[in-house]
Amino acid sequence: MHVEEIMTRPVRTVHPAATVERAAHTMATHDVTALPVVDATGTLVGMVSECDVLQHQLPATPTAPSRPATVAEIMSPFPITARPATDIAVVADTMLEGDVRSMPVVDRGTVVGIVSRRDVLRTLL
């Protein structure tokens, strides 16, 4: 079985200049745990997850410095990606080895979907 058979599409994305609040709202509204970050040309530049948002939005102490304002400040650059024809077993291994929960699916430089651990788990049922 290949990634293209289980990936979520259309994929929700966010721009690096978007506010952290906008990313959190998009995740909550669309019930996703991570968003690919794409620039104005649609090129993948990072990933932002619920964990990224929570880590940076909840101050460690009341006197903590100001919180990051944009997705670019909290995203993980250079995310691990999959191609549509990648075997699901390879994706599962990569997710486990790299502690990756969601992986953008890229075809010819364009994000065409996203696959999560939950998507992989559903194939076992």
Image: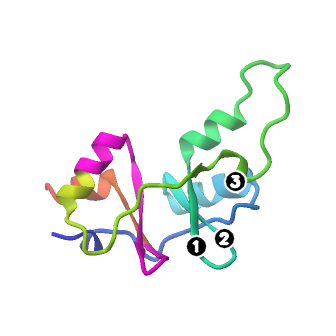
Q: Position of residue 23 (x, y in %)?
A: 66, 56
Q: Is residue 48 left or right of residue 80?
A: right
Report which residue position mark 3 lands on. 71
At label 1, the amino acid type is: Thr
Report which residue position mark 1 lands on. 43
Mark 1 closeness class: few <14, some 14–19, many ≥20 residues within 10 Å = some
Q: Is residue 82 above or below residue 109?
A: above
Q: CA distance from mark 3 to mark 1?
A: 15 Å
Residue 100 inside the magenta-drawn segment: yes
Identify which residue is drawn at 55% across, 45% down. Answer: 50
Q: Is residue 85 left or right of residue 29?
A: left
Q: Quadrant of the N terminus?
A: bottom left
Identify which residue is drawn at 85% across, 19% down. Answer: 63
Instruction: Identify the secondary structure beneath mark 1.
Output: loop
> Mark 3 or mark 1, which has the lower sequence index?
1
Instruction: Kindly indicate the quadrant of the structure image that contains residue 46.
Output: bottom right
Q: CA distance from mark 2 to mark 1?
A: 5 Å
Q: Nearer the viewer, mark 3 or mark 1?
A: 1
**Callout 2–callout 1 Cβ contact below 8 Å:** yes
Q: Quadrant of the C terminus?
A: bottom left
**Callout 2–callout 3 Cβ contact below 8 Å:** no
Mark 2 closeness class: few <14, some 14–19, many ≥20 residues within 10 Å = some
Any mark on residue 39, and which? 2
Residue 104 inside the magenta-drawn segment: yes
Q: Position of residue 65 (x, y in %)?
A: 84, 28
Q: Position of residue 110 (x, y in %)?
A: 49, 78
Q: Nearer the viewer, mark 2 or mark 3?
A: 2
At label 2, the amino acid type is: Asp
Q: Magenta stretch?
A: 93-112
